């Protein structure tokens, strides 16, 4: 068996329609035209390959775009994350608790006509005091409920399951 530090990620397409559930980790990378390496690194459809398991230690939600000012807060408003392993809910919490790498530091200025929102909720993701094991062959999914419609066009929001990937189980 070989262990690796790993970030298993998938992308939710937040858009101008609220009250939407985004179900992640159900389509493998390359499973359709959308699922490129930029979008996901999931290698199975709803489960890990038969020789892999993942011990999830931290879950991160990262806006993968420069969101308009209204959407910086809106993507987290009335939203939640639910993780299910073997069809059992193992984690359920407000989406804002998972915010990671959402803020910027330093000085930034430019012409008012091109203003951008280089801000966001600061955070280090949701650290799991009790890590969650996704065993080999077990089905799993992360559902993100988008509670508020965004002002801008479709924006990618990454969900990253950070932990220890074991191969050769």
Image (tube, rainbow, N blue to C red):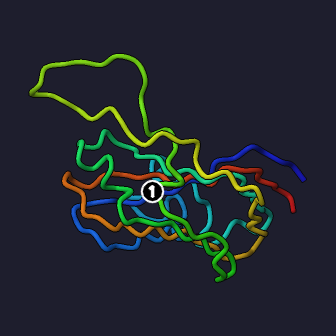
Residues 77 and 51: in front is 77
Name the residue: 57% across, 52% down. 160
Which residue was labeled with disc 1? 11
Q: Residue at x 72, y 50 (%)?
A: 163
- 124 lies above or below 11: above
**Figure label count:** 1
Point 63% across, 69% down: residue? 91
| Quadrant where the C terminus is found in the figure | bottom right
Farthest bottom residue in view: 87
Q: Position of residue 30 (x, y in %)?
A: 49, 59
Image side of residue 4 versus residue 63, left or right: right
In the rendered image, residue 96, in percent from the top left (x then y), is placed at 47, 55
Q: Quadrant of residue 11?
A: bottom left
Asked if residue 1 is positioned above or below residue 83 in the image, the reply reads above
Q: Residue furthest left?
A: 113
Residue drawn at the location 53% of the way across and 58% of the way down: 29
Q: Secondary structure at mark 1?
A: strand
């Amino acid at each position: 068996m070989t262990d690796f530090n790993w970030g298993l990620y998938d992308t939710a397409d937040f858009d101008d329609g609220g009250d939407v559930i985004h179900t992640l980790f159900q389509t493998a990378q390359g499973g359709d035209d959308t699922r490129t390496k930029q979008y996901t690194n999931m290698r199975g459809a709803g489960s890990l390959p038969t020789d892999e398991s993942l011990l999830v230690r931290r879950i991160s939600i990262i806006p993968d775009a420069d969101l308009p000012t209204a959407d910086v807060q809106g993507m987290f408003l009335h939203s939640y994350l639910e993780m299910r392993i073997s069809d059992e809910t193992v984690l359920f919490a407000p989406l804002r608790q998972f915010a990671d790498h959402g803020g910027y530091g330093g000085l930034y200025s430019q012409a008012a006509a091109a203003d951008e929102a280089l801000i966001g909720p600061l955070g280090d993701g949701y650290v799991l005091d009790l890590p969650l094991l996704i065993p080999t062959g077990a089905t799993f999914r992360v559902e993100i409920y988008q509670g508020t419609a965004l002002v801008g066009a479709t924006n990618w929001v990454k969900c990253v399951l950070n932990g220890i990937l074991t191969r050769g189980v």
